[in-house]
Structures are given as structure tokens and as C-alpha cells.
Image: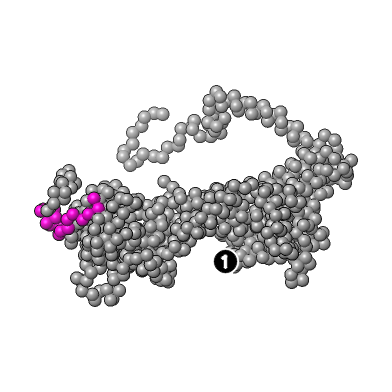
Amino acid sequence: MTEQTYAPGTYPDLPPPSDTVGPVHWLKANLFSSPVNSIVTLVAIYLLYLALPSAFNWLLIDATYVGETRKDCAPGGACMAFIGERFNLFVYGFYPAELRWRVNLAAILLVVAGAAVLWDKMPARKHIMKFAMIYPLIGAWLLSGGLFGLEYVGTHLFGGLMLTLTIGVTGIVFSLPLGILLALGRQSKLPIIKYFCIGFIEFIRGVPLITLLFVASTMLSYFLPPGTTFDLLLRVLIMVTLFASAYMAEVIRGGLQALPKGQLEAANSLGLNYSQAMRLIILPQALKISIPGIVNTFIGLYKDSTLVIVIGLLDPLGIGRASVADSAWLGLSTEVYLFVAVFFFISCFGMARYSLYLENKLNTGHKR
Amino acid sequence: MSEAQSNSTTEKCIEIRNMNKWYGDFHVLKNINLEVCKGEKIVICGPSGSGKSTMIRCINRLEEHQQGDIIVDGTELTNDLKNIDAVRREVGMVFQHFNLFPHLTVLENCTLAPIWVRKTPKAEAEATAMEFLERVKIPEQANKYPGQLSGGQQQRVAIARSLCMRPNIMLFDEPTSALDPEMIKEVLDTMVSLAEEGITMLCVTHEMGFAKKVADRVIFMDQGEIIESNNPHDFFDNPQHDRTKLFLSQILGH
């Protein structure tokens, strides 16, 4: 660069030096910034070269996607025909085929309600929010029926993806408010509330979910009055919700503690009462801070729903395990577990991306 | 409001009688007696740890006292939540660290309490808020978030936010201590103009220029006690106690 002088105030906006922008700079900065980094990059490229082509062949080139029996599948390739064959089982479990429209309708309504809750630019959001508030009741009614002319479907017939969604959505919807109450209760000045919340949280956190599920499936009947019938899935939903809410409470407590004390003092000094201060000032900020932890708990809850296999309910993983044992379609565990893994990954990755979007949207630039 | 204006200027606004406070075993406030008349401007100074902030925070019960009486606008501060909320509605407070609500815009910060506590209609609350934001000379920042403003601007928003509740008493807890020198002036100017309008003010501050200019009384506190209380002229020119003299020589000496 030649030295040039400018009168004050006339200095032009110059482009950045050419070696700090562009693809070559990116490669240099990210892949070959040091000798060690360069070696790691080359080794990674070699490993990808070894793994990718054969995986690609197996999954796409040599794979069989359409077929009726095991014999239709080409050897050496993925036998995805099996997944297609069992697709309805993976989605609906053992839900009666002629009633599957109810599951479909519940799913469509879930998308509508979910969109209103998650997306603040949704048209007519205010009205749909009211619908979203009562959606849990509508969804439960559509799925299990037994009221207002809908045929009853026992929850032992629930399975597959719809079971995962039922458990996941119920757990997520109810564990968040419950977790908030537990977190606030834990900070209460009233000893009864405080120690109840602490006891509850520590007990639930100290016991594995699988134990709680066994309790739900067997032991509850000892505690309940004889003759009470209490739907198995409902017990599972309650246990999963309680389990997630204990973790949720601790995540939110972290958010509450991260707020400066001055926020509550300012709210109080303006005359806001406790519930106003919490609702308008403290929780919006604490929940925002807690978003990564909250979504983390959601993802954990969603994946933990596979544990219902131990009490005889079949989620996609359970159905996959049962399918692998089918003597007509032997040796397909890779395909089945890959399918289940992809299904869970898509759902969980979606939640993670949404959490990032929400964090960016709520960032009002006070992080300085 | 009109009731307040018709009252005589000698009416007692705040009465603190034999008030004591402990943090655990530590006796932070010792036998405090203080009467503040309507419209009076009081500046409280003293070394750090002397209990100044704690004392004014007792007035709107951000801190609890354990002994003695505090009567604000005729309401005695007890554990009764109704009394506390009633007092807090009429007492504004400005904090050292502003304590604006970072998730709300400047305008929302100012309208929140009037809407939820006073049940003012939103449009009216916004009009009032804009009026006060103009008074503190930052109406153009109304739709920004606090994190986008400078410290001095944030503190002026905090003052406007308190004023929007139309309080009878304003408490200032070291309002300029967290500010850069050039921002201190803009906040002090706002406070001076507020003082000229006749609102009752209690101000914990180290800004002795401000004290000389607006205070009716200057109170010096040390180790939890009120050592000296006098009009600014006598306080600065003729301090009575050795500790006051030492303190003044330290803060005015440079």
C-alpha cells in the first residue's frame, strides 16, 4: 500500500486487505491454520474417503426401497423395503387401521396449535392460542375416544411415533409450568412450600426414570384403593411429566439466580406485587436465560420416552426391536435402528434449532 | 393529587422513630430518628458502610427494620403486604445500577407499573411516559431497549420510570455512582430540575455540589448512626462533629 494523505474528514472507506477475506482465507483460517490442524484435516479427509463411498453405496446405490419380501432385497445393500412394509406400524403402533384418521387429525391439529405457540407471526395467533390452550383435551379425546360418540381405543394399542409424540408433547406441555412452580416454590419464604418443593425435586432427581416407570406400572395399584382402574399410559405420562419437571425446576432456578437482585427490587419499588413481578419481570428474563437448559430437558424427555418399552409399551424403538426379531425379515437390524435413529435425530435437531432461533429473537442487546 | 397540593408544607411526610436494624448480629442502623416534611430535599452522605443506603431502603421496605417505627405518608410500615404495596406505590426509587428491565423497551419500562399497578389505560400511560421522557430529555429513545443506551441515559429513564407512577416521595440511592464523569452532570441536572418542582426527595450521594445547590438539609451518617443534620450552609462551613469534619476534609480536599 502506498502512503497517501487525506484531509481530516475525507478519509474514504477502504476494502479490507485481500488476504483476510474469501474462500482461500477461510480454508487457511479454519482447516490449515497450524501444522497440527493441517494433519487433522488431512486425516479426516482420508477417513471420509474410506467411509463415505461404501456407506453411500449401501444406503442408495445397492439399496432396495420397494419390495414385498426379504427375497426382493438385493444383497449387499440396505433393505429399506422392510421399513416401507412396516411403516404404518412404526407410525401408528397397533392403533386400529380404520380409526387412524383420528391420529392423523390429532397430528394436524397439533401442528396448528404448535405453530401458534411457537411462531409469534402466525396469522390470527390470538384466536388459535385459545384453541392451543384446550388442545391437550382435544388431542386426548381424539386419540383415546370414549366420549361424544368416538369409539374408545385402549391406550395399550398406542405405539410407534404417535406414542412418542403423545408422551413427548404431554411431558413438554405440562413439565414446563410445573417446573416453573417448583422453581418458584423452592425459593419461597414459607417453609412448608419450600421444603415440599426441595423434597420433591431431590426425590425425583435421585431415582432413575426406569424405576419410576416400574412404580407406575406395578406399585401404584398397591397404593390406590382396590378396584380403581388407572390407565397405564396415563400413569406413564404423569411419571414422565413429574420426572421432567424436577429437572426443569432446577434449570429454571439457575435462570432465576442469574438475574441481578435489583430486578426484583425495582419491580417491588414500583409497587408491583409478587405475582406481577414474577410474571412481567422475573420469569420472562429467567426463562430466556434458561432456554438452552429447558430445551435440553425437553430433548432428554423426548428420548427417554423410549424407556416405556420396559413396561410393555412399544415406541418406534420398541417396534424396531420387535421387527428385527421377525423370522421372515431376518438380519435387518442396521436398517431398522438407522431408521429409528434418523427419526429421533430429526425431531431433536428441530428442537435444538428452534431454541437457537428463540434465543436470537429474544436477545435485546443487554448482554454487554 | 389535588389533596396533596392543598396540604401545608410543614406536614410530615416520613417519620422514622427509634429505628434499629441488624444484619444477623451486625447492628447496621442504630436508633435512627428522622422526620421529613413534604417537599423537603434531603441529602444523606457518609463513608461507605455507614448505613445510608440501608436507611433509605427501609423507607420503602426493600429492607426490613427490626425495631422502632417508620411512618410514610401516614401509613406505618409493618409486615402487612397491603401497607407495603400502598407505600411503594407512592414512593419512587432510583438505584445506583439503574435496574431497568432489559427485556422491555424504554417506553414499556415506563408504562408497566402505571398500567398494572394503577390500572391506567395503555394510551394514557404512554402519553404520560412520553411526557416524562421529554422531561428527562430522551423522548427519541422511547422504543429502544435499555441495553442500547448509555449509562446516563439509562439512569434518566429510571428517573422517568419512577416519576410515571406520580410518587409523592423520591428516593435516590447513589444515582450517579456508577456513571462516567460526563454523564453525572446530565443526571444531576435532571435531579435539580426535579427538586425545583417541589417533590420530596431523599438522596444518598457523594455529589456535594448537588447537596449545596438543592438540599434543605444534609445528613451525615457514620457506623449506622446519624451524626449530624444541618442546613447545607452550616453543614459545609461549620460542621459540629469531628467525624463530619474528617469526612468533609477527605471528600472536599481534592
The answer to whether residue B12 is left or right of residue A47 is left
| Residue B248 in view | no
Residue that badge 1 annotates: A126
Secondary structure of residue under mark 1: helix
Q: Is residue A93 above or below residue A152?
A: above
Residue A341 lies, in percent from the top left, at 71, 43
Chain at tag 1: A
Q: Where, quadrant-wise, is the N terminus of chain A in this rendering?
A: top left
Q: Nearer the viewer, residue A289 or A44?
A: A289
For the residue pair A299 and A73, the one nearer the viewer reads as A299
What x and y, as percent, mark residue B206?
Answer: 23, 51
Q: Is residue B13 left or right of residue A83?
A: left
Instruction: Identify the residue at image location x=89%, y=40%.
Output: A71
Provide the residue span drawn in magenta. B223-238
Measuring 80% from the left and 52% from the top, which residue is drawn there? A89
Kind of residue indicated by mark 1: Lys
Does residue A341 appear anywhere in the picture? yes
Task: Give the image's coloring scheme.
Answer: one colour
Give residue A230's quadrant in the image: bottom right
Residue found at x 74% / y 64%: A227
Whether residue B228 appears in magenta in the rendering, the answer is yes
As for residue B206 lying within the magenta part, the answer is no
Question: In the figure, is residue B125 to the left or right of B29?
Answer: right
Q: Quadrant of residue A123?
A: bottom right
> Residue A54, position in %: x, y?
75, 32
